[in-house]
Amino acid sequence: MAGAARMLEDLGCDFIVHHIGYDERRGIAARGERMPSPLDQLREVVEAVDIPVQAVGGLTLEQAVRCPEYGAPLVVLGAPLTIDADAFRTADGDLESSLRLICEKVHSYGDVPTGKLARNRKDI
């Protein structure tokens, strides 16, 4: 994964989307293996490049808002994390409050160093 991220950076990409797709996760789980998470290799990918990284795919809401701890400041909130399965609303019906709370948690990390700056930090 880190090698692919470096290759994308070398090709001129401005950021990396570190994603493990639903079908891939489910196929691995169907073989009786532990379902992978983008967090498994996120720190390695972040340290491999000098551009921002985002993780997506199979994360819980709690994991998604913790991505800045790994040096990945671009947080992705897909529909399964934020809305009811049958309607575009949160389970409790208050999408705006839920999104405000998520944003507060993510923004509480402040400016998250990426690339070389992230590699030099000792607390991530």
Image: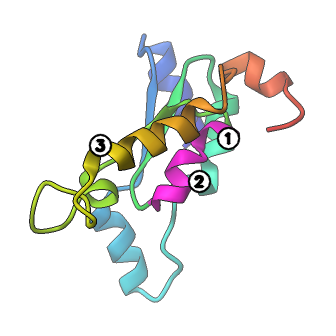
Amino acid type assigned to the residue bearing label 1 in the image: Tyr
Mark 3 or mark 1: whose residue is earlier in sequence: 1
Q: Secondary structure at mark 2?
A: helix
Say which quarter of the image contains residue 12.
top left
Residue 18 numbered tag? none
Which residues are drawn in magenta?
A: 59-69
Work out whether 24 lies above or below 105: below
Q: Residues within 10 Å of mark 1 (few under 14, many from 20)?
A: many
Q: Quadrant of the C terminus?
A: top right
Name the residue: 30% across, 49% down. Answer: 78
Name the residue: 79% across, 26% down. Answer: 119
Q: Secondary structure at mark 1?
A: helix
Q: Residue furthest top?
A: 12
Question: Which residue lies under the disc numbered 1?
Answer: 70
**Residue 92, position as x, y percentages in the image:** 28, 65
Q: Is residue 118 left or right of residue 41?
A: right
Mark 3 or mark 2: whose residue is earlier in sequence: 2
Mark 1 touches mark 2? (CB < 8 Å): yes
Amino acid type assigned to the residue bearing label 3 in the image: Glu
**Residue 88, position as x, y percentages in the image:** 13, 54
Name the residue: 63% across, 17% down. Answer: 50
Say which quarter of the image contains residue 25.
bottom left
Q: Secondary structure at mark 3?
A: helix
Q: Which is more foreground, mark 3 or mark 1?
A: 3
Cα gap from disc 3 to disc 2, whole angstroms: 27 Å
The residue nearer to you, when weighing 84 against 5, is: 84
Question: Which residue lies under the disc numbered 2?
Answer: 39
Mark 1 or mark 2: whose residue is earlier in sequence: 2
Q: Is residue 85 left or right of residue 56?
A: left
